[in-house]
Image (spheres, coloured by chain):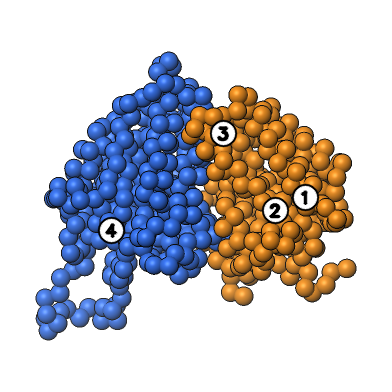
Chain colours: A orange, B blue
Amino acid sequence: MLSLTDPKSNNPVLASLQIKTSEKIISVKENGSADSNFILTHLIKQIFYEKNKILLIGLHNTLDHYQNVGKKLGYDFKKSIDDHQAGIIEPLDDLTQKIIEDDVYENKEELVKCLFGEIQSQIALLSESTTQQIYLIVDDLSHLLDLGVDIAHIISFINYCNSLVDTENVAVVINTHVCNKIDEIISNTLQYVSDVHIEVASLKTGRSTDVTGVINVSRDGGTNHYQYKTFDRGVKTFHPGQAIFNMYK
Amino acid sequence: MDKKPAGNIQGTILSTQNAQRLISSGIPSLDDLLGGGLPVGTVALIEEDLHGAYSKIILKYFLAEGIVSKHSTLIASQDINPFNIIKELPAVIDSDPESSKPKTSGTSDKMKIAFRYQNIQVSNDSKLHSLGHYYDLSKNMSLNDIENSDISYWSGQRLENGSNSFANPAYNQLLKSIKDKIKDGKFFLKDNPSKKSILRIGIHSLGSPMWLPYRKALHSIDSSRDLDMFIFCLRALVRSAYAVAVITIPTHLYHEVSLERCVHSSDIAMRLQAFCGTELESNQALSDFHGFFYLKKIAAINSLASKHPGSVEYVFKLRRKKLVIETLHLPPDIQESMDSKKNDIPSVGCGGSNKHLLEF
């Protein structure tokens, strides 16, 4: 039953995604020059509305970015962290520190294990005394590749996440950026295990002022195609060819 | 990157759209394209033209603007002595050199053709620039100004032992010196110095053959992996500080795909393609310009929408005193249409010159 205040009915992005709570693994594939961050920020809105908890792993965007975008979409991320509704792991600074000091892990697998250990302890903290679902959101898994992590270890990370979904009350949202063959392998693996696969790409024909790009939402039942246009204060989605009806609203 | 310090920092403005602190790139036309300027805490990547001449000029503008705005500077290069780049910075001047606006010679004898258009702006140049200064490329900045500013040089000469994380220890060295500079100058967001300033980091020809690891003679996958990791780490560093980095990379030496990850890790990516030495040089429509300017990426930071202006093509031209980036307008197709008109003069009756087209 949808109510009027439900973002799934009044927010265009969430209305086209129609993510249900039963869908545990959501993969987001970001192609080439597209930016799929708005999918994550919108999903966060829905998760907060459903009173579920979030653990964000920020490898690409900073907490301030989420805070600023969140204010535009109507949630306060930092306040949620203070209220123990959300947690964030920002390994950027520590990792860079370690790389500069040349104090890297002997084996890059160690790095993934460390990250996962951190995730587990944070989830344990968040899941204390609640039965709510916890969403683990990974902002750009493919950045692990930049850090020199072997592809096998990244896939084992996906495997870890998969087991987490089975054992605990956790759902996973993983964003990956795809620009070469190796990224593609990660994305395909993710797509294989996921319940919903969201693909964001820019237009094949080049840039347009009316349409920013394409969203394809695939489920077992089939694929829905949408186009989207980003504005400063929100994102509009529409079916292909209907961009013109949305321009002057 | 929520930067709201008590006092205003010299040479910066706050964007009205998303409260992002912006600094000027030194080129007014480029600032306009980037939505006001370079956001503080970002990495801008410039893909060099074939000879690296124009990208070096853009880098010089960026550094000169820093010195005039009393920002701190770190300049790094393995190809040339970084002091030489600083020595050749353009001199600051009061007004726009070679302004594109036509000089009006009194109102009385002005021709009144299409008077409704006379108040329409000729170009975006007439917009008031509160940020940035004008520079004269034909003169060099005085050494006095340079000596009085805080500039660090990195030329990669004092290389110590190898590194575990990078194949080439030079990358590690550079990251370390950038971090030390940020630490010493108290540019970290958490620092609270009495007078806040910005650190401008300019890296010239990163990833050129001079950056190859010693043991390997060819660009291997590992060496571009170094570049990915370097830009990723640099971005993490710059995000946590009042700093902006501009990097030029000779991308024509790389496979196109191997740089995609670098572009993804950077916040702004642009590419220069000079006409010099290509067949475009003789193209009449492009004869006024020196090359194409591609804006590959402007990341949406602190907002949902990227400030990318959309599907417009840009060109740059280097005048005697300044570099300008403009929208490409193709000139009216006058000459060719004159030629083609000659050919199809309408003929009377059925016996025209095009008759043979209908014959089988």
Q: Mark 4 belongs to which amino acid? A: Ser
Q: Residue at x 54, y 34 (%)?
A: A98
Above or below for A48 versus B103: above
Q: Nearer the viewer, mark 2 or mark 4?
A: 2
Q: Are marks 1 and 2 in contact (CB under 8 Å)?
A: yes
Give the CA separation, mark 1 to mark 2.
9 Å
Q: Any mark on residue A125, and which?
A: 1
Do the residues at pointers 4 and 1 share their chain? no
Q: Any mark on residue B235, and which?
A: none
> Who is closer to the viewer here, B219 or A65?
A65
Sooner in the amino-acid sequence: mark 3 or mark 1: 1
Q: Residue at x 61, y 58 (%)?
A: A66
Residue B213, x across and y down, in percent: 42, 21
Label 3 packing within 10 angstroms: few (<14), some (14-19), many (20+) = many
Query: Circle 3 sits in a helix, a strand or a loop, which is it?
Result: loop
Q: Where does label 3 land, which residue?
A: A147
Q: Any mark on residue A87, and which?
A: 2
Query: Circle 4 sits in a helix, a strand or a loop, which is it?
Result: loop
Residue A160, x across and y down, in percent: 77, 36
